[in-house]
């Protein structure tokens, strides 16, 4: 037995109801009967001319090469674009999406995180002015059809065998990472080929690259050509770390982001810092977080305390980054690389500062720094 939606084959999840067998592993998306003949989701045909796209900035020669190689492979085989944080990943897939749209093929851009969906769909709409770009995520589900669909990985359950090209952005991010149901649903939503976009491919992707089932295209350079900032690591007792952090914050007049491992620590840290300077705080529990992020972006030199909810997808031009308690078990190599990657992303300020503060030595922070050094060495 196999669930037609999440591809589960584990018998423990199959139950027999009055209408027959169904899968309980993906029951949160509604009951699906195993015997039921699942037909592909019906979507409208692609509009003529929707493939025309405009770029805000011309691509660098490196970006052009990756973009072109990717477009050649799109529709033929799965591709992994392994590009450093801030390399302009979205721009790299426009050519591939355009090629598929010109062939009247359905294209979807799926992202684990809801807050990125609306931002990205607006950007894609600006790039593809003639296409109907539809954002689908919690709170935006009235319209689910379009030439180009941008959705959360959760919403892919609506699109059984619907897409000829499925672009998975940040597939190593929560909640997609390690979630077999979401992986199964992504698999069944795609009837063609996939493109994975990430700076931190996981073990499964690396294995597929090795056995040849996934074509890896690397981009180790940011558009401005500067290296990714390497983190400085300081190990000391927490009282000293707090003093170092305060000094680091006071020495700068840039936007400064302080990442902490837990919601509790974020609240304590924000309360502590407010004794000395104004600061905002963003966690997954905060309801006003969009407003706090918007206010932080407006200021030229604000301070924001955040949990990993902010580790990806949110770009604050010219930011400096500190990870407090970087040796905490909540962080993994990928999240440390993502947080460090928030720094130095603009042409105006390509060299941000990244500081890791930890109470004990950690192989993880060492490994993260080594990975960034390796990537920078490859870019030369
Ligand atoms: Zn299932």
Image (tube, rainbow, N blue to C red):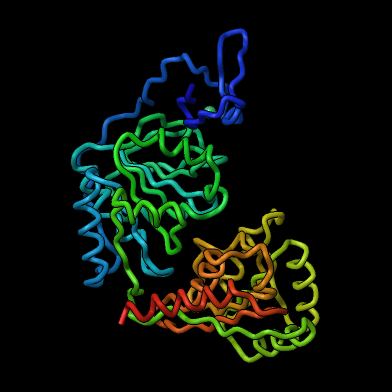
> Where residue 259 sits in the image (x, y, percent)?
64, 71
> Where residue 166 sits in the image (x, y, percent)?
35, 43
The residue shown at (24%, 48%) is 74
The residue shown at (61%, 78%) is 322
> Where residue 97 sits in the image (x, y, percent)?
27, 48
The residue shown at (40%, 41%) is 134
Q: Quadrant of the C terminus?
A: bottom left
Residue 151 is left or right of residue 354, and the answer is left
> Where residue 121 sits in the image (x, y, percent)?
41, 50
Classify residue 30 by image quadrant: top right
Residue 145 is left or right of residue 362, and the answer is left
Task: Say if residue 128 shows up in the picture.
Answer: no
All told, the count of numbered labels is 0
- Figure check: 234 above or below 342: below
Q: Residue furthest front?
A: 211
Q: Residue furthest top?
A: 18
Classify residue 291 by image quadrant: bottom right
Residue 361 is left or right of residue 167, and the answer is right
Which residue occupies the foreground of this view, 158 or 194?
194
- Figure check: 345 above or below 286: below
- Figure check: 1 above or below 152: above
- Figure check: 100 above or below 172: above
Task: Say if residue 242 shows up in the picture.
Answer: yes
Which residue occupies the foreground of this view, 13 or 156?
13
Which residue occupies the foreground of this view, 142 or 153?
153
The residue shown at (49%, 61%) is 313
Residue 325 is left or right of residue 6, and the answer is right
Which residue occupies the foreground of this view, 183 or 67?
183
């Amino acid at each position: 037995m196999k669930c037609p939606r999440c591809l589960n084959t584990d018998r423990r999840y199959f139950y027999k109801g009055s209408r027959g067998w169904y899968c309980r592993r993906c029951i949160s998306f509604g009951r699906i009967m195993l015997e039921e003949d699942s037909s592909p989701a019906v979507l409208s045909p692609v509009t003529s001319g929707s493939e025309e796209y405009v770029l805000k900035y011309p691509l660098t020669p490196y970006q052009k090469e990756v973009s072109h190689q990717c477009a050649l492979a799109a529709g033929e085989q799965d591709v992994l674009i392994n590009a450093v944080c801030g390399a302009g990943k979205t721009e790299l897939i426009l050519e591939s999406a355009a090629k598929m749209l010109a062939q009247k093929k359905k294209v979807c851009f799926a992202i684990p995180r809801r807050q990125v969906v609306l931002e990205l769909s607006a950007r894609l709409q600006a790039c593809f002015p003639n296409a109907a770009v539809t954002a689908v995520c919690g709170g935006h589900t009235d319209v689910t059809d379009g030439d180009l669909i941008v959705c959360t990985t959760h919403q892919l359950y609506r699109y059984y065998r619907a897409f000829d090209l499925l672009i998975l952005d940040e597939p190593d991010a929560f909640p997609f990472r390690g979630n077999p149901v979401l992986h199964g649903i992504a698999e069944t939503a795609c009837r063609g080929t996939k493109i994975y976009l990430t700076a931190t491919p996981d073990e499964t992707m690396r294995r597929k690259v090795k056995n040849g089932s996934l074509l890896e295209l690397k981009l180790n350079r940011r558009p401005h050509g500067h290296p990714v900032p390497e983190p400085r690591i300081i190990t000391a007792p927490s009282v000293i770390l707090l003093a170092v952090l305060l000094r680091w914050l006071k020495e700068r007049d840039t936007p400064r982001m302080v990442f902490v491992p837990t919601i509790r620590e974020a609240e304590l840290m924000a309360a502590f810092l407010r004794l000395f300077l104004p600061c905002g705080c963003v966690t997954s529990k905060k309801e006003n977080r969009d407003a706090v992020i918007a206010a932080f972006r407006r200021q030229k030199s604000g301070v924001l305390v955040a949990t990993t909810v902010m580790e990806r997808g949110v770009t604050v031009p010219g930011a400096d980054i500190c990870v407090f308690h970087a040796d905490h078990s909540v962080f993994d190599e990928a999240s440390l690389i993502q947080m460090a990657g928030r720094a130095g992303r603009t042409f105006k300020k390509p060299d941000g500062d990244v500081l890791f503060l930890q109470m004990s030595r950690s192989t993880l922070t060492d490994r993260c720094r080594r990975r960034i050094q390796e990537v920078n060495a490859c870019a030369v």
